């Protein structure tokens, strides 16, 4: 991990937090972990499709310090206006200057088609849908967030939940690797342009979530199946809570360079 730009991020005062993919897995664990650190008059906006599971995350996050707004939304379909309105509505009764820090976690993610060989990816419609959710709508949500918080941009903190697959090819995962690489590079370019905004690309390691079961059920690539089956059989998968804690430690310590890719297994400084 780079040791440059080392100012810590203080969320112990009023803080605004938006988090996508909050209904389960890593997103839920990060939401719960971040909620514990927030100061009085903080607001959290939780996004995902599953209303019931979102409500469970919300009740785990709510406290005397934290008001939680849950908005069930299909992020793959949402228009720019809908994304703007969802953030805007969560700020009803607040002024953006009320918040000492304004955080967004781009955690939403899917694996794509694991049943097609990389040399035979001829379904452009399916590829578009994959990139819509995992890249284009992430960029769009981020753009609406920056628009809303423009006046206090130096208080903005952005976390992209990335993957080792963004920087290392994994056979059988061309949708996922190319989507994660494109998404991570977008946040790196943004960080390059806006040095006053803290941008972290956090890679959570292999984590025990629905994604792992999806790989085991859908993958056609033998090596991919073997890797994930051995993660499971050897008990090496991380718990969502463990990687969420590390994500928060790295983030709040602030010891990462603009847009840096920090992995769960990297040493902490
Ligand atoms: N698990 C791992 O080992 C691992 C490793 C590296 C990186 N990651 C990354 O970590 C992030 C979270 O992964 P996870 O393992 O926790 O996956 P997960 O359990 O499958 O959770 C994915 C989340 O995204 C939401 N989501 C999916 N499609 C959506 C849509 N169309 N609109 C709105 N929300 C949608 C899901 O909620 P709904 O279904 O309710 O919409 C869910 O909350 C992803 O970006 C993933 O790439 C995971």
Image (cartoon, rainbow, N blue to C red):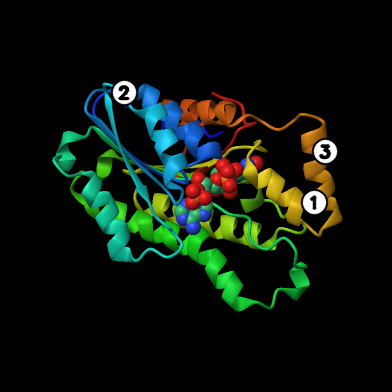
Disc marking residue 47: none
Q: Label 3: how many residues lie within 10 Å, few (<14), some (14-19) or many (20+)?
A: few
Q: Name the residue under label 3.
A: 230
Residue 134 location (% of width, % of height): 52, 58
Residue 144 location (% of width, % of height): 30, 57
Earlier sequence position, callout 2 versus callout 3: 2
Residue 251 location (% of width, % of height): 44, 31
Q: Mark 1 points at which residue?
A: 224
Residue at the spot 46% in from the left edge and 62% down from the top edge: 76
Up the image or down, 127 lies above or below 245; here it is below
Earlier sequence position, callout 2 versus callout 1: 2
Disc marking residue 63: 2
Q: Distance between the residues labelled 2 and 1?
A: 42 Å
> Circle 2 — which element?
loop
Q: Left or right of 257: which side holds 163?
A: right
Residue 82 location (% of width, % of height): 30, 61
């Amino acid at each position: 991990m780079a040791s440059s730009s080392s100012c810590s991020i203080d969320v112990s005062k009023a803080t605004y937090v938006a988090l996508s993919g909050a209904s389960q897995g890593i997103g839920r664990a990060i939401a719960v972990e971040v909620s514990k650190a927030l100061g009085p008059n903080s607001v959290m906006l939780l996004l995902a499709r599953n209303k019931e599971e979102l409500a469970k995350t919300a009740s785990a996050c709510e406290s005397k310090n934290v008001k939680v707004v849950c908005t069930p939304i299909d992020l793959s379909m949402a228009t720019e206006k809908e994304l703007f309105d969802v953030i805007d509505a969560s700020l009803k009764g607040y002024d953006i200057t009320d918040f000492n820090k304004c955080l967004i976690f781009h955690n939403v993610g899917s694996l794509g088609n694991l049943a097609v060989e990389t040399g035979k990816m001829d379904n452009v419609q399916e590829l578009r849908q994959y990139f819509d959710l995992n890249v284009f709508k992430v960029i769009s949500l981020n753009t609406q967030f920056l628009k809303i918080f423009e006046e206090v941009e130096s208080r903005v903190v952005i976390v992209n939940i990335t993957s080792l697959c963004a920087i290392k090819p994994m056979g059988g995962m061309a949708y996922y690797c190319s989507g994660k690489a494109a998404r991570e590079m977008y946040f790196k370019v943004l960080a390059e342009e806006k040095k006053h905004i803290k941008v972290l690309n956090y890679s959570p390691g292999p984590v025990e979530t629905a994604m792992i079961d999806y790989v085991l059920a859908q993958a056609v690539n033998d090596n991919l199946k073997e890797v994930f089956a051995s993660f499971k059989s050897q008990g090496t998968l991380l718990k969502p809570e463990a990687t969420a804690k590390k994500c928060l430690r790295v983030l709040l310590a602030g010891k990462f360079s603009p847009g840096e890719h920090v992995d769960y297994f990297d040493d902490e400084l």
